[in-house]
Amino acid sequence: MANMFALILAIATLITGVIWCIDRVKWASAQEAAGNALDNKTLVKVGGQLGWVETAASFFPVLLVVFVVRSFIYEPFQIPSGSMMPTLLIGDFILVEKFAYGIKDPITQTTLIPTGHPQRGDIAVFKYQKDLSLDYIKRVIGLPGDKVVFDPYSKTLTVSPNCAAGQRCVSALPITYTNVEPSDFIQTFSSLDGNKIGNGFYQVPQGKTMRGGLRLGTRKEMLGKVTHDILLVNEAQSQASIYYQQPGQPQATWIVPQGQYFMMGDNRDNSADSRYWGFVPECNLVGKAVAIWMSFYKQEGQWPTGVRLNRIGRIH
């Protein structure tokens, strides 16, 4: 099951709801039998008989509110990796708007009421199609019918709408970039079988260094009407040879099928995204990330070391 926690929560809400109803019926019957005037002796008797029922029933209102809010309105998520830096940092706790892309059955993820579709530039949470137990978060780059071209050397995008099914593409979207500048982030590396792999991300003021670390570059990407910062490993070589190869398309070129989306991380050289594993079906979408409600200083797989209160607020 794609969402085991949602299933457990639904079952718990149902069971406590049934107990809550039984409790109300039993209590009403006791009041009616006593002529709506229960003396202390009757209260003690009824309370002793239904004590466990009342305890279980008391959880129902709380579970019901949690179930409704989490399933249809907002769901909290933690950012576990640096793939969306600098927009989202490891240790950010975010709220995801569940109804942004449709009101769905929380168990099967079937859309019950359509409410909207992702737009270019949205930050979306979705079920990873190769393992539906995993939630991924990336930025929406390509919509159904878009032709997406990524130059792995200049690390720039070209997006042309309405290219599906052999249609003639309309003019490419206006995607522009600022010059690459040093960022406030340093990435550290460790060796594994002779290969260097990313190990951690640290916010270090410019002018200072960190042993074994490499300062990342940053620039703004203007994707149509949406402007956001991205991070780059300036020394990183092209990995186009392991990109997802769509049948009938050149390397590093994709045409997004109908009902699917092309996603990329803002930390471009540290993100496993659609360039590597393909498209995200609309049925896998969980919701749109809209706000950070708490943030901790931490590294991937480590305990927090402090709180970043300045990050709380809407996601831009």
Image (tube, grey):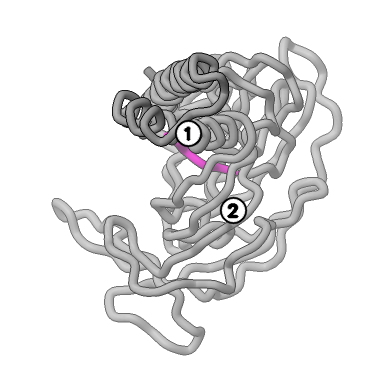
Q: Residues within 10 Å of mark 1 (few under 14, many from 20)?
A: some
Tell whether position 136 is magenta.
Answer: yes
What residue is shown at x 44% (from left), y 22% (from top)?
Answer: 23
Q: Quadrant of the C terminus?
A: bottom right
Query: In the image, residue 68 lies at what x, y percent?
Result: 58, 30
The correct choice, above or below, for 273 with respect to 282 in the image is: below
Residue 44 in the image: state x and y as whole percent: 34, 33
In the image, residue 203 sits, relative to residue 177, either above or below, namely below
Tell me the distance, in whole angstroms, between the alpha carbons under discs 1 and 2.
51 Å
Which SS class for mark 1?
A: helix
Residue at image x 39%, y 25%?
Answer: 12
Question: In x, y percent, where is residue 47?
Answer: 36, 31
Residue at the disc numbered 2: 154
Give the side of residue 310 with respect to residue 40, left or right.
right
Please tell me whether mark 2 sits on a helix, a strand or a loop.
loop
Segment tinted magenta in the rendering: 135-139
Q: Amino acid at mark 1?
A: Leu
Quadrant of residue 58 in the image?
A: top left
Which residue position holds label 1?
A: 63
Which image quadrant for residue 213?
Answer: bottom left
Side of 245 relative to 262 (left or right)? left
